[in-house]
Each structure stands twice: as C-alpha cells, then as structure tokens.
Image: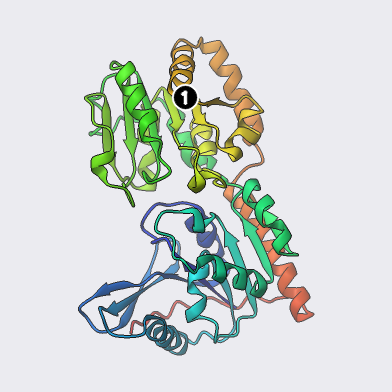
C-alpha cells in the first residue's frame, strides 16, 4: 500500500504539520508527496527527490502558456503512477485544489487532513470552497488541525476528528540546554529579546510589532521566518526589530534559547479564525514564556490553563512582558513544571499513532478485512 499526499506547501518551505505526519507515514509506507506545479519555459515534466525521512517529493514542472493545466498535470500523475508501479494506494489531501487532477483515479481510501481554512487565506482560489465540498463527500475520513476548525467542519462529515498541533519535545527542549551557543546572526543582538519563528504573512499583526518596538526601544524583537504573500516594505523597520530570515528546523532551538520571551503576534482576522499555531507547544517545550493574541485555539487550552499570556493590544503585551522580564527563578521553575505536566502526553509520535490507527480502522471497515502493509521499495524514476 502506497500513500500519495497532495499538498499546497513545499516540502522544504517550513517544517510543520505535513512534514511531521508524512515523515512518520514513510516509516511504514512508500510515500509520494506531490507539490503544486512550478511553471517555466521547459516542457512538462516532473522530478522526484527523496528526503532524509524517505519521503519521495514529486515536483510537477509545467511549461508556461501551454494550454489546459489540469489535463497536463493529470498526464504527469498518470505517468508517475505507471513508472513507479503505484497500483494500490491511499490519497492524503491537504488541499482540495488537487481534486481536478486526481478524480479519475481510484484510491483504496481518501483522507482529508484539513490543517487550515484555506478559503480564508490571501489569494485563495475562487473555486476552493466548491472543491472542498466535493472532497468532504469523497473522503472516508477527515482530520482537522485544531478544535475551532473541527467545530466548523464537524457537521459536514460523519467520520471527522480534531488533531491540534503537536510537538517534538526532545527537539525543542534543546533550547533549555545552557551549553547551546547563540547563532552568529543573533549573538550581537542586545538583551532583552522577544522572539517569533514562523511564516510572516497576512496573519501577522504588523501594527502590534510596530507599536511595541516604538514604545520599548530597548527591547529587541527577533523575527525568524520567510515573508510571503505580503509586501515586505509594509513591515515595520526599527533599530530594535531584527528580521533574520528563514531557518532550518534543526536550527530553531539554538535561536529560541537566546530569547527571554516568545510571542504569537497574529492579527484577529479571517485568516486566523481557525488556526492552531504549532509554535505554541514548541515555545513551551523550549521552556520560554509565551505572549499571544487571542487566537481561539491558543486561548483554549493554553490560556485557560495559564500557560500562555493572552493579550488584546500592545499595552497589554508591554505590561505582561515587563512582569515576565522580572520573574523570579522559583516562579519560573513552578511554571516550567506545570508546562511539562501539561505537555507530557503531547507529541507528534502520539498524534501520528492515533491518526494511523483511525486510518487503518477506516480502511479495514471499507474493505471488510485488515490492511496489510507491503514492503517499501524506493525505486526512483523521474519523467
């Protein structure tokens, strides 16, 4: 049995939910991760690259201005299936926009991992809601990336489960290691530091960052991550705001180690209505206090359990940060203990195990028998 994943996010963009889950599936299945197409002057083709996690990443390359895009992608997908001997397979969708190129195929099981409400994002295709309705009818099982999204979708499917963001605790706990050296592009930034790591896009509260930086010029705001879908010229510029760009997943603990506080500075808008930021438990696992705007899936459970400080405006942010900067070591240790207790049963391994169990149960009930996992054969061919 092969697992074919269709995702709107590049594998090498930011290591997040798709990478965590799909990497774990690759330990049991042959996994193809098919990305959205790239356009160039070259003829239609595709490439396959194998990752460190044994995921086969397929990039579709389409020639610009050469007719029906969907039909040409279907031909490439069909060629991929033929050359790679993909005969018995499951489909795992992260975006319904892949439906027009896969409707003609016959998977053993169709899974929709709805990690975000993509229709609310900037530049969302006009047809995405219609296609999602079709995908919800086609899928035998649906997962959501958080509880808010689950509440919004649960009446649209009979076999749907919420799986909020998880963590790789061991990875982010490295930030608690006093021996970690500050990265070269951060080591000369003065203290105190407040940090953020993630994608900087239309969800980012630009004015919050601008106001805090202006009112507290001695505080250093460190921002890590790519800038996408917004004009970088609209971002606030100040001597105490430091844009360090995108970093590899492996590097993040060394940066977080050098921050006194972490933040989730998302605006409250349509794009953030249903998000469940992965960085929330990651910051906590790193042992860093968190200040967040009132994102629903952060307010509950993190805010209600007093693990994350929830703010409405810049003045709230400043007041809480001032208290955190003067927190006594014994109080920090008490908070850390509460964090560790709360996160004890939270991990990507557990999330994947629970998801995989549901997938196997659904597949077995559909076929009327237990699913067997075929040997993995990484015979890679490119078109």
Scheme by which the image is coloured: rainbow
Residue found farthest to the front:
126
Decide if residue 353 is on the left or right side of residue 87: right
Where is the C terminus found, in terms of image quarters?
bottom left
Q: Nearer the viewer, residue 247 or 239?
A: 239
Location of residue 182 in the rendering, given as x and y in whole percent from the top left corner: 30, 30
- Find residue 382 and report its image quarter: bottom left
> Residue placed at 58% from the left, 50% from the top?
348
Is there any visible trace of residue 287 in the rendered image? no
Crowd rating for badge 1 (residues with CA inside 10 Å; few <14, some 14–19, many 20+): some
Location of residue 282 in the rendering, given as x and y in whole percent from the top left corner: 50, 38
> Residue placed at 50% from the left, 12% from the top?
327
Location of residue 365 in the rendering, given as x and y in whole percent from the top left corner: 78, 74
Location of residue 374 in the rendering, given as x and y in whole percent from the top left corner: 60, 78
Q: Nearer the viewer, residue 78 or 340?
A: 78
> Residue placed at 23% from the left, 41% from the top?
233
Where is the N terminus found, in terms of image quarters?
bottom right
Q: Does residue 284 sit above or below 225 in this rendering?
A: above
Is there any visible trace of residue 143 in the rendered image? yes
Residue, disc 1 = 313
How many numbered discs, if any? Answer: 1
Q: Secondary structure at mark 1?
A: loop
Decide if residue 359 is on the left or right side of residue 313: right
- Find residue 76 and report its image quarter: bottom left
């Amino acid at each position: 049995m092969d697992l074919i994943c269709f995702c709107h996010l590049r594998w090498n963009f930011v290591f997040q939910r798709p990478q965590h889950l799909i990497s774990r599936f690759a330990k049991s299945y042959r996994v193809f991760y098919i990305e959205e197409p790239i356009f160039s002057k070259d003829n239609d083709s595709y490439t396959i690259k194998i990752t460190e996690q044994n995921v086969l990443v397929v990039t579709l390359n389409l020639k610009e201005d050469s007719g029906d895009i969907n039909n040409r992608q279907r031909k490439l997908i069909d060629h991929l299936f033929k050359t790679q001997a993909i005969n018995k397979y499951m489909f795992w969708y992260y975006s319904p926009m892949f439906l027009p190129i896969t409707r003609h195929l016959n998977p053993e099981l169709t899974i929709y991992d709805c990690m975000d409400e993509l229709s609310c994002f900037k530049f969302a295709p006009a047809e995405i809601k219609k296609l999602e309705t079709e995908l919800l009818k086609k899928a035998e099982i649906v997962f959501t990336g958080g509880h808010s999204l689950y509440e919004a979708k649960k009446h649209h499917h009979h076999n749907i489960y919420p799986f909020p963001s998880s963590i790789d605790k061991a990875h982010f706990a490295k930030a608690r290691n006093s021996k970690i050296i500050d990265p070269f592009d951060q080591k000369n930034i003065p203290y105190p530091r407040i940090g953020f790591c993630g994608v900087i896009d239309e969800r980012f509260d630009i004015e919050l960052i601008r106001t805090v930086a202006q009112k507290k010029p001695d505080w250093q705001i460190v921002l890590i991550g790519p800038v996408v879908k917004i004009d970088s010229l609209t971002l606030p510029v100040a001597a105490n705001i430091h844009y360090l760009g995108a970093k590899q997943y492996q590097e993040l603990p060394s940066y977080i180690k050098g921050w006194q506080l972490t933040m989730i500075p998302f605006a409250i808008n349509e794009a953030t209505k249903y998000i469940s930021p992965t960085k929330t438990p990651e910051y906590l696992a790193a042992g860093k206090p968190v200040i967040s705007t009132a994102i629903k899936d952060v307010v509950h459970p993190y805010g209600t359990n007093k693990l994350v400080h929830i703010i409405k405006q810049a003045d709230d942010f400043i007041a809480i940060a001032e208290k955190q900067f003067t927190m006594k070591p014994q109080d920090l240790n008490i908070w850390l203990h509460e964090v560790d207790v709360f996160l004890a049963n939270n991990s990507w391994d557990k999330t994947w195990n629970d998801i995989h169990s549901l997938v196997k149960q659904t597949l077995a009930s559909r076929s009327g028998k237990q699913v067997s996992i075929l040997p993995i054969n990484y015979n890679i061919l490119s078109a």
